[in-house]
Each structure stands twice: as structure tokens, then as C-alpha cells.
Image (spheres, rainbow, N blue to C red):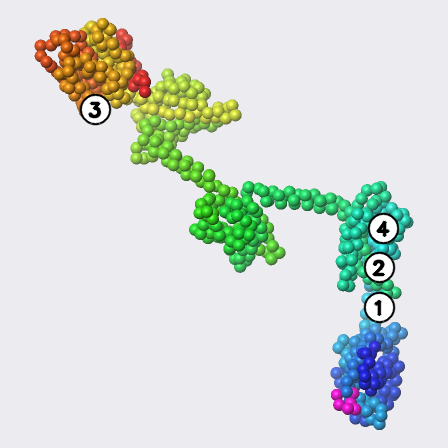
Amino acid sequence: MNTPSTDNPQLEEAKALTSRLMHMHYCDGNSKGITAFLAPQFSWLGTGEEQYITGQDSVDAFFQKLTGNIPPCRIWDEEYDALEPVPGLYIVTGRMWIATNPETKMFIKVHQRVTFVYQRMEEEFRCVHIHCSNPYQELVGDELFPEKTGRQSYHFVQERLTELEQQALQQNRQLEVVMSSIAGGLKISNDDDAYSYAFVSKEAAALFGYTVEEFLTVTGGTAVGAVYPPDLKRALADCAEAFRDGGLSYSTRYRVRCKDGSLKWIIDSGKKAQDAEGHWMVNSLYLDVTQSEEDSQRIREQSQLLTSIYDTVPCGIIRFIRRAGGEFELISLNQAALSLLGYKSMEEGLRDWHGGLLGSVLEEDQEMLRQTYFQLHRVGDRQDREYRVRWGDGSLHWLEGTNMVVGSTEDGDSIIQRTLIDITQRKILQQQLNQEQEMYRVAMESSADTMFEYLTDSDTFISYEPRPRQGVKRRELSGYSKLLSDKSFIHPEDAPAAMDNICNGCGESFEMRVVTPDSAPGYYQWHRISSRPIYHSGRLTRVVGTIRNIHAMKETLLENSTRLHMNQSALQAISGVYLSIFYVNLTEDQYYAVRLSQAREGLPFPRIGSFSGGLFQRLLALAEEQDRPRVAQLCDRGRLLSRFSEISGHTEVEFRQGPSSSGGHLGFVWKSTQFLWTTHRKKTLSSPCAMSARRSNGNWSAKPRKKPPNRRWKKPMKGPAGPTWPSRTSFPK
């Protein structure tokens, strides 16, 4: 095939002569005819390594050798170009395919390139130079034509064809197996408007419950007729888009009505190709994707659900890529993350993304988070971190982030997901708890009580004993219920009460005698136990309470009780002397009337009340005006507190009463800040004022007695019951 004609007919003549010479050489074997067109000064450059000839005689001899050595060939796809660089000189370049004919029993196919140079001589074209090049074949030895290569190629092709035939048979068998196993079938359609069927496999028809004949009838013999009408417009649009601008492949998805009335989703995909006659056909595959489509629908619904959860969950989610070079690429973040980080919009948050973090993270915590990311290596690795963020309004918030590798990219970079929760309130509560714990620790260290807890499941007793300047000492006793039977640990008489109230959770306050770790063996000390049972799901799990050492108080009470018993007779003897007897607690500023005077005696006091605001003021009102300053001074609460903190003793104050000459007498017996106040019966005084004081070690009897010996706690001594003084708790607050 020549290039389009030009306005120069001589160039067209040169191209036509070139094509004629090529056919004479390869198709006709007319070497002698070629030499007739050669100029006397001719040169030839062939495809072989040594094929270069110049001169008339050498050329004639060479072309004589070619006669009979060139097997018949055919030429196609010829293309020639011609130009006239100087008047009378013409250059023609050509390109074509050359192949041996089948009867030669060799196979050679080459892409030949030639250059012919012509000179106009005596109104005729004479060839002065020919250059042939063949980039795909080599001549062997002194061959004038690649015969040996051609024959080798022929045998190779024959063997290859045999192998291909066997492979084709095997592939056909495999294709039959594949076609019978796939959830679809093949079809071939003509490239017309309705894509009419040229072939439909039985598997394709059976996919919808039909035979091939039934399917062709139902569909009208066209692929368009098989489409479920509501899906037809979209399917045709998919095909038109795929075939636009010369496209050959297509794929579309639609439904087909089956023989039983059901609908099946299929993928119809294929490619355009030309058959042997050059007609365009569409080779396609029907693939049943009904289950896949249903699964996809469920996936879409789940995806929509996950998206809604992702956008509405109160937990912040940030997903990003950590590159190998240390860069970070944001993938996504939800609205909750923006809110927790203090941003008002998605655009604001995206603008503030820098190096794996949003800028609201406190600068002091940013490097800590970045280092955390590089500690994550494999999928599933996680690190939990607490950090702070500052919102646009200046407020500081605490966040807890869980950083985890959830996948990787095709390049091997890690995909990290960070979840965020606001722990600001928890931090505040934790701080308050720490403060309360510190206060609790200080309170325990300053308290004399020992805290304890008993764990019923493990039969373990744990005590927390405060020690001055040493903190709290923890002791743990395993098998506590068994230890209660050990006489070296607890007094045998007190073991049942401990078992009931501690091990069994009765929760009553009781006293028991135990041997402390710091005391000598066999030396029991009295302790008061207050306990409280704790239940979980209706089952006793723990008993907690306090332990107070009351041994010293017990000894003091025994001592006082002994004194009261010893002085019972003395009290009875002098009871007729005193109008009233009051027990006064200066610290609490309260009194309790041990004995009250008769109403006719002129001292009608309440049984209990305030000392300074009640008892003292009433007694002061009884004194004559001249004696009131002295009585007020000697009986002032502040003065008495000061004196009683240093000494114990006895004092009496006499005063004149009312306008008459009769008077009154006040007596005090004190120890520390608690004392006994007595008032005498009325009597006539010989002097305006008289006061006496004597040491009595807390005893108001006329004859002091010796202090009882300091001994370990024993049971109270037997004897007549005597009066007991009210405890501090008996006074109303």
C-alpha cells in the first residue's frame, strides 16, 4: 500500500517501480529482470553481515546466485515514501511484511525495510543503490536467504502447533468443567441495538431454569429481552458508556426473571471482538451474584449503621497512617473527637492537624503522644495514654486515648486508630479522693483507734494501726477463726463474742482481752471493738470496724470504783450535811446533779444543764452583793480550767446569802477538769468571808486515803454497790 499520491508524478513512478522490484525479487524469483533497472555505478547493502556489493560486474554475479535461492514469498502491508532531494535524483523508502509460502515447508516472517535510490537517465529510472535491512532475522554462514532459520522455524512452528492443539483440547475440556461449575454461562451476541443472541450455552439458560430453546423464546432471542424491565435503562447506559470512544470491554449488573417467577441478580460482562469474517461480536458471561447482592445489601445496611454509630458514638475516633519516614497522614475522625478536642467544625479540626496530632493537645503532652505511636509495631499493639487539651475558650480538659495498630497499607505503613474519652471529671474526683485519702491517713495517724477488716471468704483479719510519726502499720492474720481458740492470743472468755461479732458479722460493740504484739506473753489488755457487717448480693463478705485500747481507762475506772466503794459510808454520813451535789465537766461546760436540795431549801436546780450559764449564775445570785465579786472570781470557769489542768485539790467558799445574816457554803473537789461541787446547809457566819483549801488527790472525804497500788487489770473487787459518776457521754450536747 502506497502513501497518498502527490502532485509530482515522477515520485509516484519511483514508488511503483520499487514495489515492482520487491515483488520480482521475493515473489517471482526474477533476479535477471531486476538487473535491467540497475545503473552502471550501482551499490547494494543486504541484510547479511558480508552483503555489500558495488560495481556492475559484482552485482551481476551476485544476482545470478540469487536465482533459485529465494523461496516464493508473499508481501503485504507495503508502505512507501519518496522524495527528490536534487533534480533528477529520487529516494524511495519502503516497509512491508514478507513471509514464505506454505508449500516451501519453512516459516519465515520478517518485517522488511528497503531504501532505493534512483537517477533519471535517458528519460528512464535507473537504480543506483539498494539498502535492505531485516531487524528480526539473521543469515547463517554464506546464505543469501535465511533458509536454515526458516526451516528451523517451520519445524518449531509445527511442533508448537501440535502442542497448541493438545493444549486446546485440554483447555476445551477444562472449559467444559469450568462452565459446568460456575454459577453462570456463556453467550455471544451480535453488535446490534438489541444484542441479539448468536450463541447461548446450556449453562446460561439453566441459570434461570430454562432450556436453551425456552430461553431464546422467552427473551425473543436478544440479550435486551432477558433484562428485568426496571433495570434495562441502567444496563444499556452502562454498555453505552463502556463502548464509548472505541472501548471494547463492558460490565453491568441487573436482574433477570426466572422460569419460577423469582428474580436473580447477575453480572453481565464481556468484550467485543471480530470473528473470522470481520464481524463485531460481543462475547459475554452471565454470573449469578444474587447471594452476593443480598450480602452487599446487608453490608451496605451495616455500613450505614456503622457510619451512624461512628458519627454519633460519644467516644472520639481518629484514624491515621504512620509513614516509615515519620510522617502522619490523617484518614478520618468523627464528630465526637472534634468535640472532645474543642473544635466547632470539621474544617477547623482538619486545618489544625500537624504531625499526628491536633493542635489543641497541650504542648507538654504532644511529644509524649508521638513517641507512643512509634512504640506500636504490629497489628493489635496498643498503648493507653492520658493527656491534656486546651479548648478555644481556654479551659483545660483531660483525655484518655487508646492507641492501637488496626492494619497496614500496601506500602507496609501502619494504620493507627486512637479512641478518646473525656476523663476530666474522673481526674477531679481522683484528686478529691486523693485529698480525702490523705485526710483519712492523717486522721488515722492522729487517732488512737485501730481500723480492721475481716474477709469472710479467706478467713483473713487485717488491721491498720496508726503509729505516731511512722504512718499506719498493716498486720494480716490468716485463719483468724482458728486463732480465736488459741489461749495465747485471746482470753478464752472473750473468744465467743469475737466469733459472733467479727467472724459471723453480728456487728455489736463488745469488749475483749487480747495479747497485743507489743506486750509480754500472757499479758491480756482490754480492747473495745465496734464492727459493722458488709453484704454483697445478700451474702456476708466483709466485717469492718475499729479497735480501741481501753486498758488504761479500765484500770482508772477500777481505781475510781474502788475509791467510791471505800467512801460509800463517808458519803452516806455527810449526805445529810450538803443540800446538793453536782458533778461538773468544765471542758464541756456541763453539770449533772448527783443530789438536789429540797424545794424548801431554796435551791431548786434542774438535774442537768450548763455550768457557766446555768448553775454558776444561779448560785451567784444567791450571794450577797458584797460577796459576789469574790465568788465570781474564785468560781470563774476559765480560772478553774487553768488551775485544774495543773493540780488536783479541794477548796471551799463561804458567802452571805441574801439580805439576811444567813449564808451559804460552796465546796469543790477536783481532778483535772472535772470536779464535784457541793453546797452546805445554811449556817450563821462569824466573819464576812472564810475559805480553806487542802490537797485530797481527787477525794472529797474528810480523811484522805492512800492511792491504790498500780496493778494489772483484774476483775472488780466484791463489795456493796456504790454510787458511780456519770460519764461524759451522759451529758446532752
Residue 213 numbered mark, or none: none
**Residue occupied by mark 3:** 638
Tell us which disc is closer to us: 3 or 1.
3
Residue type, numbered disc 4: Gly
Q: CA distance from mark 3 to mark 2?
A: 121 Å
- The circle drawn on residue 225 is 4
Q: Is residue 292 left or right of residue 311?
A: right
Q: Secondary structure at mark 1?
A: helix
- Residue 602 at x, y percent in the picture: 21, 8
Mark 4 neighbour class, 10 Å CA radius: few under 14, some 14 to 19, many 20 or more: some
Magenta residues, as a range?
A: 85-90
Does label 3 or label 1 sit earlier along the sequence? 1
Residue receiving disc 2? 191
Label 2 amino acid? Asp
From the image, state whether disc 4 or disc 1 is nearer to you.
4
Query: Which residue is the extreme one toward the left?
Result: 686
**Alpha-carbon span between mark 4 and mark 2:** 15 Å
At x 76% / y 48%, what residue is drawn? Answer: 289
- Is 87 magenta? The answer is yes
Dot 2 falls on a residue whose secondary structure is loop
Say whether disc 1 or disc 2 marks the residue closer to the N-terminus: 1
Tag 1 residue: 158
Q: Residue at left 38%, top 28%?
A: 451
- Residue lying at 68% horizontally and 45% vertically, measured from the top left: 300
| N-term mark: 4 or 1 | 1
